[in-house]
Amino acid sequence: MDYKDYYTIMGVARDAKQDEIKRAYRKLARKYHPDVNKADDAEARFKEVGEAYDVLKDPEKRAAYDQLGANWKTGQDFNPPPNWDEGYEFSGGYSDGDGADYSDFFESLFGQQFKQEQSGRQQAGFNARGQDHHAKVSIELIDAYQGATHSVTLNAAELDANGQVVTKQRTLKVKIPKGVKKGQRIRLAGQGSAGMGQGGKGDLYLEIDFKAHPFYRADGHDVYLDLPITPWEAALGANITVPTPDGPVDLKIPAGTQGGSKMRLKARGIPSTPPGDLYVVPQITLPAADTDEAKALYQQMEKTLGYNPRSKLGV
Amino acid sequence: MINDKILNGLLLDETTVLSLDEVCQACSSSNEWVIELVQEGVLEPRGHQQTQWQFSARCLQKAHAAMRLQRDLDINLSGIALALDLLDEIDSLKSRLLQLEQAAK
């Protein structure tokens, strides 16, 4: 198990005062809150900071943690020394009862109290609906066009028959309906945490995200495609075959097309009511002047066309 | 544990309509809390009377975010309203930036 340096995580000195720790926590919590920070590791950082604060804000836990010594480094292999917590009495254990959010390191030090508390709560005849779970699922763009079935693996804390918290992994197969867009959610009733007493199960919310595609990008139900074209196709116009997630289509490029302009293929975006559109953005690419013949052609153009693209710049 | 059954969820999309009670249930919150979110302008249901309020999927997403911000960061409702407005604006600016970056390539 890896040692965690809670002081480094919080960015405070080992002798930091309580109000300093609180300030550091508030600042980091705002910075890494998953609703605020969309970076992939934000949620993990947010939980790590929460765990560090949980220990450092509680004078008893902090004292117990401190006596492990200052020589440990984050990531170092760690096992708690026997009776390491002798003489310390903890007020809390986990703060919000979601055991899956805490590291093995934390659990090995402070987990026991939580387990006792939870089993106590379980027997008290208390009724509450189970917690909702929220997870992201990354799909291919084509799945939004056609619909698909996706496997989703989730980690959840559960209480076993002895009232012990165990982390269980489960895999669900979920139907992704045709027509989804990024950020939309699918609600799976009853797939969240078990409730307590008579309380029903919570729900699972899956938020749709698209994996990056080498040439399509989605914006809502619309899809964009950068389409490389030759200078003569742009200048003279052409009928060319364009890929779409639904299969290739023929597209007429009008004469005089400029790079970066947008051409709309109606209802070729993600199907929905109304369906999205597919926007083709032509990008004019130059053939290399790497043979004498190619060079001669460019020189001929220079002589014949006398074109100055910088005339508007006054030079 | 692998369950081979294929689960069919409910896609929360533009056609989704939720009542006040359904939003409260989905947030495990009181009616008063959701009503406060409406009064603060965080949620904008359709319908004038409270009994006729119709919430969109986007409303539910915002209510969930509001719940987490309140729980985790201890922000009051007007602070939440401001944060969510700014986050929306950042989202739309980011997608515009992405479009422009792609076009400039």
Image (tube, rainbow, N blue to C red):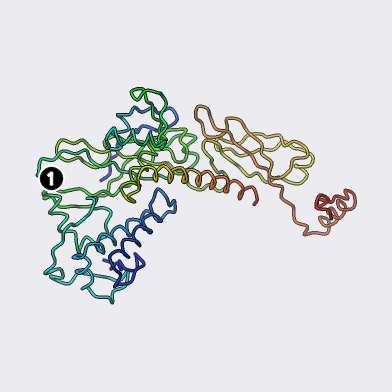
Number of callouts = 1
Please report, as a chain letter, where disc 1 is located. Answer: A
Q: Residues within 10 Å of mark 1 (few under 14, many from 20)?
A: some
Residue nearest the viewer, comparing A17 with B57 = A17
Q: Residue at x 65, y 44 (%)?
A: A227
Residue depicted at 15% across the width and 48% down the height: A160
> Residue A143, relative to residue A315: is it above or below?
above
Name the foreground residue: A95 vs A140.
Answer: A95
Amino acid on which disc 1 is placed: Gln
Taking the image as shown, residue B5 lies to the left or right of residue A176, namely left
Identify whether B52 is placed above or below A28.
Answer: above
To which quarter of the image does residue A207 belong?
top left
Q: Which residue is mark 1?
A: A122
Q: Seen in the image, is A291 located left or right of residue A172?
A: right
Q: Nearer the viewer, residue A283 or B76?
A: B76
Q: Residue B80 placed where, x, y %?
A: 39, 44
